[in-house]
Image: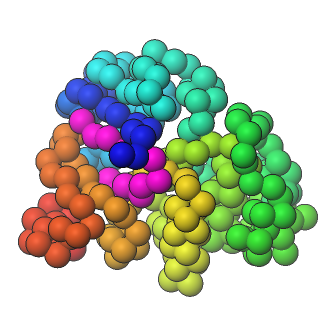
Amino acid sequence: MAQELLRIDDLHAWYGESHILHGVNLAVNEGEVVTLLGRNGAGRTTTLRAIVGLTGNRKGSIKLFGNEAMHLASHKVARLGVGYCPEERGIFASLSAEENLMLPPTIAPGGMSLSEIYAMFPNLQERANSPGTRLSGGEQQMLAVARILRTGARLLLLDEISEGLAPVIVQKLAEVILALKARGYTIVLVEQNFRFAAPLADRFYVMEHGCIVKQFAQAELRQNMGMLQEYLGV
């Protein structure tokens, strides 16, 4: 059986007085692509932020690579082998594309070399000396994903990476995810774009009001389309 890289049990999370997650349970196995689906406000982004310790109060259990990580600081979670690509991308405007790419530290052996990253993202090689402010939205998103591949992280948490991008860029990102899966990466996708996520995921979790309300495998996608229509309006 594949190793379980992430297990969440009875996870609750708050921002101030707002109780956002209400007992989330999910598991992700090594080499899987797992997608969290749900409407805006369902708790998908908060789940990713809770995994890496960026929410306020939390309770429950988050195990990463077999280690309890609930009380670890964010930088220690990263050093377990977790790469987080937030929705806001976090590109430094005053740095060139390549300087942005080289900024994160190496957290584990096995990270991609610069040449491997440029082979996967040829646009970034062409724009290596361009400041962050000069990159298109699609190039910024490629850079945000590429940046965590250098670090040695093996579990990638990707938040809305297709949002607002041209179809040709979305297709490129889909190809990248499949290439990363082929290289043994484990990926958790938070996505509003169901057409993007549907063919990529091995398994799906559907969230509503801070809870997991349904989970199913890729082979069960067709029979769950009625339920997805109800929850997502797809």
**15, 143: nearer the viewer:** 143
Residue 26 belongs to magenta span: yes
List x then y, in percent, for residue 38. 25, 56
Q: Is residue 61 left or right of residue 214?
A: right
* Residue 165 can be seen, yes or no: no
Quarter assignment of residue 82:
top right
Q: Residue furthest right?
A: 129
Residue 9 belongs to magenta span: no
**165, 5: nearer the viewer:** 5
**50, 17: nearer the viewer:** 50
12 w.r.t. 111: above or below: above
- Residue at the spot 85% in from the left edge and 51% down from the top edge: 99
- Residue at the spot 37% in from the left edge and 64% down from the top edge: 201
Quarter assignment of residue 202:
bottom left
Disc tally is: 0
Q: Quadrant of the C terminus?
A: bottom left
Q: Is residue 18 left or right of residue 65?
A: left
List x then y, in percent, for residue 170. 52, 76
- Residue at the spot 63% in from the left edge and 29% down from the top edge: 79
93 w.r.t. 59: above or below: below
187 w.r.t. 43: above or below: below
Q: Residue furthest front?
A: 1
* Residue 53 can be seen, yes or no: yes
List x then y, in percent, for residue 233. 18, 70
Q: Residue furthest top?
A: 71
Q: Which residues are magenta?
A: 25-38
List x then y, in percent, for residue 185. 55, 53
**36, 120: nearer the viewer:** 120
Q: Is residue 117 left or right of residue 56?
A: right
